[in-house]
Image (cartoon, helix red, strand yellow):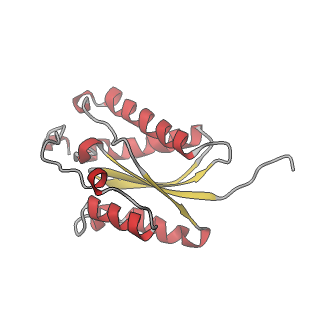
Amino acid sequence: MTHSYSNILIHLIFSTKHRTRNIKPIIKSGLYGYMSGVFENIDCYPILINGASDHVHALFGLSPNQALADVIRTIKTNSSKWVHENFPVFSHFGWQEGYAAFSVSESKREHVIAYIQKQEEHHKKQSFVDEYVAFLKAHRIPFDERFVVEKMEDAEIVGSDEEQ
């Protein structure tokens, strides 16, 4: 065979640094659009990117030529740089070091898309931490609560309400 074919769907979740609510409406659509372009530039195909003010969900197809950790590092590095360059008031914007990534079967693709589309509505009822822990448990991923349940007491919220 001269070509590689795959359908490796990944549901990626990661949060802002210290889980600050810095994904303001003023940057949200541009940020997600930029992230889509980064996925495409590294031979992955974005299906849907959405989230809440403190985290992002992305469903994408992983290229057979890319390692997952490299893709995530590229997405986070480039999107953080994009925010800094386009919105200087968000100079403290950054992403949390870790992430969660789950394989998605083609038969569950539409279910995951629907879930990601409803993020803002969903998080009116459930916190990000509760959602994240539920995902880890559902996928039987062992975790250390010290690294998941981070307190937000010292978190800096960047940007004014006027920018929302």
In this view, 9 is above or below 139 = above
Label count reads 0
Residue 156 x, y percent position in the rendering: 16, 39
Residue at point 23%, 69% (across, down):
125
Q: Nearer the viewer, residue 142 or 75?
A: 142
Q: Nearer the viewer, residue 143 or 103?
A: 143
Residue 163 x, y percent position in the rendering: 19, 41
Residue at point 23%, 51% (across, down):
150
Residue 73 x, y percent position in the rendering: 47, 38
Horizontal side, residue 24 vs residue 132: left or right: left
Residue at point 87%, 50% (across, down):
1
In this view, 17 is above or below 9 = above
Residue at point 39%, 55% (across, down):
50
Q: Nearer the viewer, residue 93 or 69?
A: 69
Residue 19 x, y percent position in the rendering: 25, 47
Q: Nearer the viewer, residue 149 or 24?
A: 149
In this view, 117 is above or below 83 = below
Name of the residue lying farthest toward the right: 1
Horizontal side, residue 83 vs residue 48: left or right: left
